[in-house]
Image (cartoon, rainbow, N blue to C red):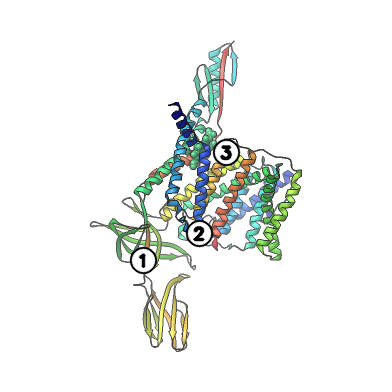
Amino acid sequence: IFGLIVKKKNIDFIGKALFVLAFFTEFLYFALRTMQTYQKGYNYLPVTNAFESFVFFTLCLGLIQTIMIKKASSIIVLFSSIIISATILSLSIAGFSEHIEPLIPALKSNWLTAHVITSFLGYAGFAINFIASSYVLYSSKKYFDKAIGSLAFGAILSLIVTVSIVYIAHSQILITGIVFWILIASMLFVLGFIVKPYEKKEWMEKPLIFGFVLLTIGIITGSIWAKYAWGGYWSWDPKETWSFITWIVYLINLHYIRKRKSARFLAYLGIIGFVCVIITYLGVNFILPGLHSYGSN
Amino acid sequence: MGQINKIIDNIYNFLKSLTLTVVLLSLIAFFSAIGTFANNVKFLQNLGLSNIYYSKWFLLLIVLFVVNLILCTLSMIPKTLAIFELKAPNKIFRSYDKTRTQIHLISLLKAKKLYIQQKNGLIAAYRYPIRKFAVYGIHFGILIVALGALIGSIWGFRGIMEIPQNQSSNLVMLRNNYLSLPFSVYNKNFTISFYENKDIPSQYKTDGYIIDSNQKIPFSVTVNHPFIYKGIWFYQASYQLDPHDSYIILNVNDSKVQLHLHKITMVDNARIYLANLSYYNSKPIALLYVALPQGEASGWIKLGDSANLGPINITFSDAKEIYITVLSVAKDPSSTIVSIGFIMIILSLLLIFLKFRRRVYKIESI
Ligand code: HEM
């Protein structure tokens, strides 16, 4: 899976070809793991614990990217691949349990499988919307926009740098992270003045609509699962609530697309939305307790 | 009169506006977010925000949102219908033989699987006209789900039943009171099964029967597989050790001692206390506290293992674990309505991916 660590490729074609290759490598890995899980007699798709769900997220992002790779701008492909490799790198370092374990009873449900697949595909769509949004802001002439765009890209880049450094030097993850975030963001900010303004909404809209549709289906299948497992469609547990908030932010974004708001405005909404995705996905699993905190070990 | 009409108009315009939608949704999102950490933050608890989702304010926001959604969707209808009114043509053909050209054009458009409409001498061809109705499906679907939630919260209930083994009960504990069912539920047996060689449970299961008048209806519920009787759903939610009936057998210096949960037993000079019973690697384990004149000891012990505590030797030789099953009990008369809403939303959402096209042709004679 380290084949995914494909960095800056100015030569468009090679970069994209490598991306597709990396995607298929990862897909192979996923398929193998699925086979192993079935061989052990546990009979489920390996998407249910923290490690597996991260891998599955990167797989979804890779899949969407691969499908639209011909038309995608290379910036988006580049940053997708950076997100993917950063996630996988942090996974292998953070020491999540890679063991294939059987499922606890509550997680044994086909609705859950449908829920996870659709939600993660949705998140992958939002990730692309996030990259495009950041790019719109980054390339804008306004200082504030550029700063936000730099911070957004800086977050992605510093993730991968931090993870590598923590791996090598075993330094404090939080401090290293923040230092590099600020450092890289300010570097990007300065560099940003050579970028030409980019105001096309296309790369924000399509992934967003795709993401919204899949997230909605994800929430619906999730609540059907909840109905069978706990007796109610909705219980306002923190993860449910945050996915609801995420959904609202993207809902607003979607309606403003229809109202033809400016690309800048939509880009800000896109960034807020993705922050919500991250809170839903990470914050709630590891901080706020609830029905969903399966990721805790 | 004109004044009043104008005010009503303004109110209507405000109620159907997207601005109001965004304000309401932002408020709903904001309060929901606060609700997720209200239980951990004292200050918010003091403000009474820990149960925000069931408060009147939250309900008011949702009601306003529903009104907004209804009005807004209704006000969109004329615009949608206007799409299917034929006015200005996009393309004009000139022909000597109008009817023949027309037949030709129509068969050509039909071959492309387009939807065709003829009116006022104009011909319109649409691709995926249903795409324009997706919005209604989605908005209406949301309304149906909201209606279902309302019905469910008025005529439904959700609670918990705790039934010890070989006993029956008809008492359901709700969030802040209780309810008795018109029949009772008998718990014959609760079992936990484990994966081979792991301490990960694979299934929790309650077998029992419903006692309704003189009938006995057998059932079994497992996690994710509820049992439904007279519109009431029973779910395997949880379980507890039954402190009255659970016991273990210890061999203390070769004499057998029966030890109940949470009860201190004297053996020779030792006081032995069973604090907990559980499973590890599919084997029962017991948490024991032993107090001797010489000192105290405590720890988990596995079935079959022994421990030597100076003057006494303890062997854990048998365990009898009896459980109280905990069932979630819910009645939701709205589940059909909600399902219909869900299906409607999903189907209409998928329509969004289709691409709507429209062309209006006109054929003029030369
Ligand atoms: C939770 C509630 C809502 C959901 C899930 C929802 C969903 C959607 C979706 C998916 C679309 C895109 C449809 C398309 O592209 O054709 C849409 C369009 C639209 N919605 Fe909503 N919406 C909601 C609430 C509202 C409300 C309250 C309003 C009223 C102000 C509203 C006004 C509109 C308008 C004006 C459009 C554009 C229709 C068009 O372009 O023809 N929506 N809605």
The x, y position of residue A60, in whole percent, is: 59, 49
Q: Are marks 2 and 3 in contact (CB under 8 Å)?
A: no
- Name the secondary structure under disc 2: helix
Q: Are marks 3 and 1 in contact (CB under 8 Å)?
A: no
The answer to whether residue A36 is visible is: no
The answer to whether residue A205 is visible is: yes
Q: Residue shown at 64%/41% (left/top)?
A: A264
The x, y position of residue B260, in whole percent, is: 36, 76
Locate residue B262 relative to residue B123 in the image: left or right.
left
Marking on residue B166: none
Callout 1 crowding tier (Cα within 10 Å): few <14, some 14–19, many ≥20: many
Position of residue B97 relative to residue A63, above or below, is: above
Mark 1, residue position = B324
Any atom of ligand 1 within 8 Å of the CB at mark 2? no
Mark 2, residue position = B43
Mark 3, residue position = A256
Which chain does tag 2 point to?
Answer: B
The x, y position of residue A219, in whole percent, is: 49, 48
Q: CA distance from mark 2 to mark 1?
A: 37 Å
